[in-house]
Amino acid sequence: MSNKERILIKNITIKNCGNFYGEHNIELSDSLDKNFTIIIGTSGMGKSTIFKLIYWCLFGSHYDPKTEVDSTDEGIINSTLLKNLGNGEKTSASVTLDIHDQDGEKYVLSRTLTATSHRETNSKKFRRSLFVVQDIKKGELFNQNNIKSIRPSNGLHTKYYDEILGKEATENIEYGTPLNWNLIKINKNK
């Protein structure tokens, strides 16, 4: 291969891929005489991931697809970002390669993957709901002092708060109990 036909990856930008959180720029040698770069690091820090991400950027597939995945495997998008997504939130990961030829012409190749969380489990546990915050005796009325809107969402939705105020408890209810309709006497004459 003559020098005229050579192309070199000058820079790699990795954003939120694998175990790389945030944006990372890796500048590689573009010297025709010394056209190699050595990446040194401890085990598990992402050296092989860099190669795999270059492959993904170029070909759009995994270098070594796995038939089985466990909780320690990193996918294309950083797993910490995925786990912390609220319902309906998005995150993306990208790899960009700046490629130069011997004449200094620059080509940019980029691949981005975006994920949107549609899992209710991520956000549901952080929602507020209605809980009993003082012991309540059977027949006692629910009021602003004995029920509150707190986390997690194990009790009735907070939209029922005003509707429940002034209603009677159907049984003795202990402090810390998530509120549910079986604990509330409903006036059927309404």
Image (cartoon, helix red, strand yellow):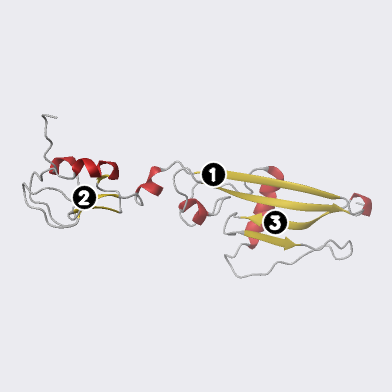
Q: Position of residue 59 (x, y in %)?
A: 69, 43
Q: Look at the picture and state if 165 lies above or below 81.
A: above
| Front: mark 2 or 1 | 2
Structural crowding at the residue carrying mark 2, measured as other residues with C-alpha within 10 Å and reported as few (<14), some (14–19) or many (≥20)? many
Between 175 and 24, the one lying in front of the other is 175
Which circle's residue, 3 or 2, is located before the other in the chain?
A: 3
Mark 2 touches mark 1? (CB < 8 Å): no
| Front: mark 3 or 2 | 2
Horizontal relation, residue 101 to residue 59: left or right: right
What is the number of the mark on residue 185? none
Name the residue carrying label 3: 13
| Mark 2 element type | loop
Q: Residue at x 21, y 40 (%)?
A: 163
Q: Position of residue 8 (x, y in %)?
A: 82, 55
Amino acid, disc 3: Thr
Name the residue carrying label 1: 115
Horizontal relation, residue 29 to residue 162: left or right: right
Considering the image in quadrants, where does the C terminus appear? top left
Name the residue carrying label 2: 178
- Seen from this angle, which residue lies furthest top? 189
Which circle's residue, 2 or 1, is located before the other in the chain?
A: 1
Residue 160: in sight, yes or no? Answer: yes
Q: Position of residue 40 (x, y in %)?
A: 68, 69
Structural crowding at the residue carrying mark 1, measured as other residues with C-alpha within 10 Å and reported as few (<14), some (14–19) or many (≥20)? some
Q: Give the spatial CA distance, label 1 vs label 3.
A: 19 Å
Q: Give the spatial CA distance, label 3 vs label 2.
A: 48 Å
Q: Give the spatial CA distance, label 2 vs label 1.
A: 33 Å
Q: Residue at x 89, y 61 (%)?
A: 32
| Mark 1 element type | strand
Amino acid, disc 2: Pro
